Image (cartoon, rainbow, N blue to C red):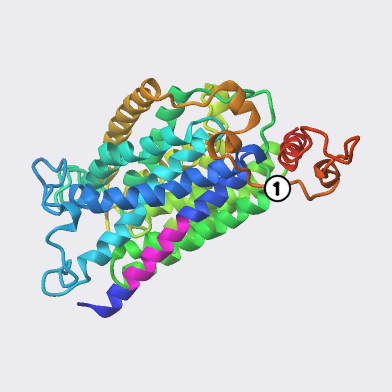
Amino acid sequence: MNGADTAFVLISAALVMLMTPGLAFFYGGMVRVKSTLNMLMMSFISLGIVSILWVLYGYSLTFGDDIGGGILGDLDHVGMAGITPETLTGGDEGIPVLAFAAFQLMFAIITPALISGALADRVKFTAWALFIALWVTIVYFPVAHWVWGPDGFIGLNGDIKAIDFAGGTAVHINAGIAALAAVLVVGKRIGFKKDPMRPHNLPFVLLGAALLWFGWFGFNAGSELAADGVAATMLLNTQVATGAAVVGWLIYEKVRHGSVTMLGAASGAIAGLVAITPSGASVNAVGALAVGIIAGVGCAWAVGLKYKLGYDDSLDVVGVHLVGGIIGTLAIGFFAIDEIGLFYGGGLEQLGRQAAGAGVVLVYTFAVTWLLAKGIDRLVGFRVGEDEELAGVDRSQHAESAYDFSGVGSAAVAAAPVPGPAGGQVPGTDRETAAAAADKRVDA
């Protein structure tokens, strides 16, 4: 066992795990106050569901020996059978397979959580949990096998030979196009294009973006599975591209809207992180700058498409993850060094491979996700009722709210018991009722 590489992968796995709570804060700050808790839970529940399925059969389907055609892994490792603490990835030398499995589990967890932002404010939590379980089974596990499996047909060992170092196709294009399919089934929020629906807590958004940025070093550099020069290149390029994307997004905002926003800066950071994920190990630092600038500007433009095209992607999963993933995947065809990319003497061959790999994922994931969402909607109903949506999904789905306003300002007065004629309390003035009234005032 290579102890240094093993420690590096274990630390990287922990960093990637932190990204899912970071995503919860990033999304949670962008929704209205009445949906905050639900948004946090939609990310957090993925940690539970996917961890169970990964051990039962997910790892085996994703990284088991191919059953033929680069389509899916076998079931030889169901329940992690045949894998011991001494089993190494490289035969006689490498890292424990269990370390690799734990690292890849974190990718499987965050990918469906990314989709949740598109469905904010309006879906049943039980339907969402069912969606996660089925989606990772019939979409994520197969697609991850195509891209990263030993003989997956999209990856470097397969027929297409597309480069995806850390998840441009398997994670971001996959989640982004799934989000589009899901919102077309679920439909628009009440008040879409009419009500402002502003983020309720921008500090939460920045906190979430910072946690994602921090964890993304494990996501990207850790995908080398070794503490070496490629990992160092990936770490530096991740930082450079993300910083460039922040600047690119803000320049677009200033030119287009006349101001720069904190929400734009946080969103630009995520766009840069997404775009450098597949390409970071193939480009130099200047190429990473180019990828970041293009992603920042391109994704800032793309988030406005939902208003023109009429689909209600609540938190811009399509505009950031789908578009950013496509930019990063295709950028390899232009900026990859070592005579691979077009700008470095490689011609158009690799660009065609990148486009083919992205295209396969786009078509498969959109079709299967649409059918899956439609089936869930028919079976249990995907969306909450109109009254529940207007009141807020926090209370209807969780019997809780993210904030207790009963002791704040005028709400404290409203929450206090009102004396009745005989010293008792007037019915209907208990603290829970007052807190609900305070929530309504804040929402208004």
Quadrant position of the C terminus in the picture: top right
Tell me the residue that label 1 is attached to: 404
Amino acid bearing label 1? Asp
Give residue 89's quadrant in the image.
Answer: bottom left
Query: At which x and y percent is residue 238?
Result: 45, 60
Quadrant position of the N terminus in the picture: bottom left
Establish if 123 lies above or below 289: above
Give residue 237's quadrant in the image.
Answer: bottom left
Query: At which x and y percent is residue 233?
Result: 38, 67
Q: Nearer the viewer, residue 242 or 42?
A: 42
Is residue 250 in sight in this rendering?
no
Magenta-tinted stretch? 8-19
Which residue occupies the extreme left position in the image? 68
* Residue at 19% from the left image edge and 72% from the top image edge: 94
Which residue occupies the extreme right position in the image? 421
Establish if 388 lies above or below 319: above
Establish if 376 lies above or below 20: above
Q: Nearer the viewer, residue 123 or 164?
A: 123
Query: At which x and y percent is residue 134?
Result: 31, 36
Establish if 131 lies above or below 168: above
Residue 1 falls within the magenta-colored stretch: no
Q: Nearer the viewer, residue 427 or 16?
A: 427
* Residue at 55% from the left image edge and 45% from the top image edge: 27
Query: At which x and y percent is residue 171?
Result: 36, 46
Residue 15 falls within the magenta-colored stretch: yes
Disc 1 secondary structure class: loop
Which residue occupies the extreme front position in the image? 422
Q: Magenta span: helix, strand or loop, mainly?
A: helix
In the picture, measured across the screen, residue 258 lies left or right of residue 119, that is right
In the picture, measured across the screen, residue 131 lies left or right of residue 316, that is left
* Residue at 46% from the left image edge and 60% from the top image edge: 18
Classed neighbour count for the residue bearing mark 1: other residues with Cα under 10 Å, few (<14), some (14–19), many (≥20):
some
